[in-house]
């Protein structure tokens, strides 16, 4: 199973339209947003995805009532971080700020996804992948990125636009 990963869209609707195109062409089965959607109209753009969207709220997702209405309308699923779940046989922890990852030694996840920093991160430690595709709300062509993670191989790729 391949999943798309996007973070910190910050209401850049032009980039969000491009992100929808990228994921619709990328053969992913699910898109995961790691927070900072910012406004409900961004979710209206993500309604163009050909696959489900799930995510967590970020520190800039202040318009919760409007976001909640759009999430319900488009049948997306968003939760407060950390969101811990299993998918395709992998344990996954989804947060916005990497400081939100559980620190207890009892928590091991195959995949840890985060945003917030706007910086690319692909870190492998003890069989665990921590991934953030990086900036996607910027104005500079070619410097924005989203990611794809293949859960069967636990490999990631970055797609710049």
Image: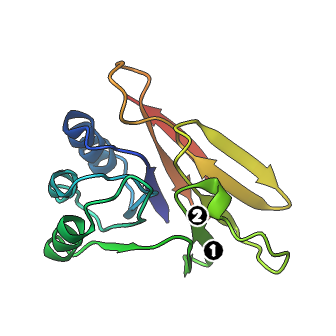
Among numbered discs 1 and 2, the one appearing first in the sequence? 1
Measuring 46% from the left and 35% from the top, which residue is drawn there?
135
Q: Which mark is residue 120?
A: none
Residue 52, above or below 89: above
Position of the C terminus, as image quadrant, is top left
Q: Picture coordinates of residue 85 (x, y %)? A: 55, 80
Q: Which residue is mark 1?
A: 90
Is residue 53 in view? yes
- Residue indicated by mark 2: 151
Q: Residue at the spot x=71%, y=71% of the render?
A: 102
- How dense is the environment of label 2, judged by Cα within 10 Å: few (below 14), some, or many (20 and up)? some
Indicate the position of residue 94 as horizontal and vertical percent values: 55, 66
**Label 1 close to label 2 by CB (< 8 Å):** yes
Residue at the image position 57 percent from the left and 36 percent from the top: 119
Q: Position of residue 39 (x, y in %)?
A: 23, 53
Q: Nearer the viewer, residue 61 or 141?
A: 61
Q: CA distance from mark 1 to mark 2?
A: 7 Å
Up-down relation of residue 21 to residue 50 (above or below): above
Judged from the image, the secondary structure of the residue bearing numbered disc 2 is loop
**How would you rate the neighbour count of disc 1 (Cα within 10 Å): few for under 14, some for 14-19, many for 20 or more?**
some
Left or right for 29, reference 105: left
């Amino acid at each position: 199973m391949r999943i798309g990963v996007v973070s910190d869209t910050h209401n850049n609707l032009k980039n969000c339209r491009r992100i929808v195109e990228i994921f619709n062409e990328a053969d992913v089965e699910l898109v995961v947003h790691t927070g900072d959607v910012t406004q409900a109209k961004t979710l209206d753009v993500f309604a163009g995805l050909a696959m489900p969207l799930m995510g967590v709220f970020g520190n800039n997702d202040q318009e919760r009532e409007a976001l909640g209405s759009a999430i319900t309308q488009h049948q997306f699923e968003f939760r407060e971080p950390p969101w811990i779940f299993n998918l395709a046989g992998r344990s996954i922890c989804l947060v916005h700020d990497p400081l939100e990852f559980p620190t207890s030694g009892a928590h091991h996840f195959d995949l840890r996804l985060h945003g917030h920093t706007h910086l690319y991160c692909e870190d492998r430690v003890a069989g665990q992948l921590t991934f953030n595709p990086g900036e996607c709300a910027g104005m500079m062509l070619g410097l924005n990125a989203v990611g794809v993670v293949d859960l069967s191989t636990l490999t990631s790729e970055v797609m710049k636009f």
